[in-house]
Structures are given as structure tokens and as C-alpha cells.
Image (cartoon, rainbow, N blue to C red):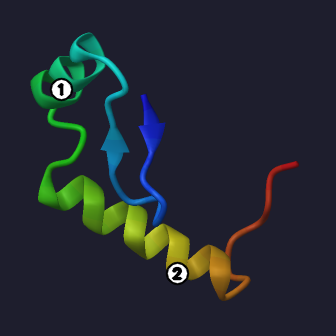
Amino acid sequence: MCWSENGVEVLGKSDCGRATIVALRLNNPLAKAVRHAMDLKKTAGLLPTIP
């Protein structure tokens, strides 16, 4: 698995990875909205960076 270019969606590289993403609902609307909000806060410098 890997992240999409925008960092909001999880992408499966294999059939098993894609099935896992669907089974665990990793790209459900709430999860994607949270990742997007976290990215905006990180970009704005409102979140600490982890080395």
C-alpha cells in the first residue's frame, strides 16, 4: 500500500492491498476528511513535525 499524491487516500499496490483497503474502509469519507484536515494544519505549521 502507499499514499496518493495528495496524501489523503491509501492506494493498494496489489490485489491483496486493494482488498485490505476496501475491507478496512481506509478511504471512507470521514477518514479522508480527517487526513485532509491534518494535512492543512501541518502545512499551516499548526502541528509539530515528527522527524
Mark number, residue 35 = none
Q: Residue at x 18, y 26 (%)?
A: 24
Disc 1 target residue: 24
Image position, residue 18 (x, y; %): 22, 25
Q: Residue at x 47, y 36 (%)?
A: 2
Q: Where 7 sits versus 13, above or below?
A: below
Image position, residue 25 (x, y; %): 15, 35
Q: Which of the image's four quarters has the N terminus?
A: top left
Image position, residue 49 (x, y; %): 79, 61
Type of the residue with mark 2? Leu
Disc 2 target residue: 40
Q: Residue at x 27, y 68 (%)?
A: 33
The disc, 1 or 2, on the residue closer to the chain's N-terminal end is: 1
Image position, residue 51 (x, y; %): 88, 48
Estimate how packed mark 2 is, as few (under 14), some (14 to 19) or many (20 or more) residues with alpha carbons within 10 Å.
Answer: few
Q: Looking at the image, which is closer to me, 19 or 25?
A: 19
